[in-house]
Image: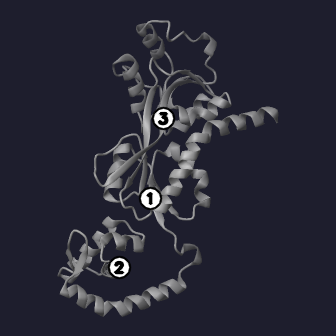
Amino acid sequence: MQSNFEWFRTFKAIYETGTMSGAAKHLYMTQPGVGLHLNALETYTGFPLFERTARKMVPTEKGHQLYQQVITLLTGLEDIETRFKKKAGQDRATVAVGMCVETFQQALEKHIPHLPFNLIMEFEANDQLTQSLEKGALDLILTSTVSDNRLLTFEPFTIEKLVLVAGKKVDVNTLPDFNAITTEELKHWLKEQIWYNTASDLKLLNKFWEENFKQQPDFFPNYILPNKFSIIRCLSEGEGLAVLPEFLCREAFAEGHITKIWEGYTPIENSLYFGKRKNSIVVDEIEQLEEMLMKEFSNVETEALLRSAMKTTA
């Protein structure tokens, strides 16, 4: 087993700050990452370097000895690293964020060139994002489900409504009156239509169908596409139906590319949450991202209508 310079740097930070969280903040690392470095160093040296107490990491005698032997070397190496570090990489925190890819493309992607910190994105299902948050691999997630993990916090910030949309070539004047015909007649009509869905999120159609008809859909969509924006682009060129979050469709609605035709017997709404760990080491960066996203979710409809009006008058 070979040693790693970062293990010693982490050891020094724990020794000087007295806590795992303090070391994590100093090094711009996650607390689980600090723990992994310390465990690896203790395995390498063969003896415990700290006594773990509820509030403090107390150096053992071996820990004191190791610190005295490495402090001069570590300080010298860190000084060299600082002087030769690329200017663009100095003092930049790194934030790992998880959400669905469509929300990223709609709300966050355009802001990335202007962020004053590094960003790592992860696109997974809600359960997987929560697991990554619990493990310390992510700092912030956008999710419609919450966890009862006491180390995490979930703050609601917007409502996601599911709607049934029709493609541009669907003649909306010939659609049946969904609220006037019987449930069985409506189900029969819907099942005769062309349907789109995504491989990664079949739950949207299932949930919409279950809420309105009290059963799972007994048909399979005609087209399974990579993401929801692919569905919107395809519907913008032809016929077909899909169940989509209204937030993602507002620009296409405003430009007349697709049409919202039904919200269901009762609107289906999901709360979206910011999920994060308590005592995060990147609180300021997370707050910047949250403000950015809240503004995008609140302004997207207005911006889409303005773009549509500009095109009309051009």
- Name the quadrant containing residue 171: top right
Q: CA distance from mark 3 to mark 1?
A: 23 Å
Image x and y of residue 273, in percent: 42, 44
Label at residue 96: 1
Q: Is residue 64 above or below residue 283?
A: below
**Residue 118 in sight in this render:** yes
Q: Which residue is mark 2?
A: 13
Answer whether labels 2 and 3 touch (C-beta < 8 Å). no
Q: Which residue is mark 3?
A: 160
Amino acid type assigned to the residue bearing label 3 in the image: Glu
Task: Assign a secondary structure to mark 2.
Answer: helix
Q: Residue at x 39, y 68 (%)?
A: 29
Which quadrant does the C terminus fall into?
top right
Question: Of residues 191 and 28, which is closer to you in this image?
Answer: 28
* Left or right: residue 26 compared with residue 59: right
Q: Residue at x 59, y 28 (%)?
A: 235
User: Farthest residue toward the left?
Assistant: 47
Q: Is residue 116 above or below residue 155?
A: below
Mark before the other along the chain sequence, 3 or 1: 1
Image x and y of residue 295, in percent: 58, 46
Amino acid type assigned to the residue bearing label 2 in the image: Ala
- Name the quadrant containing residue 266: top left
Q: CA distance from mark 2 to mark 1?
A: 22 Å
Mark before the other along the chain sequence, 2 or 3: 2
Please rate how many residues cluster around mark 1, counting C-alpha atoms within 10 Å: few if below 14, some from 14 to 19, many from 20. Answer: some
Q: CA distance from mark 2 to mark 3?
A: 43 Å
Image x and y of residue 31, in percent: 33, 66
Q: Is residue 100 above or below residue 239?
A: below
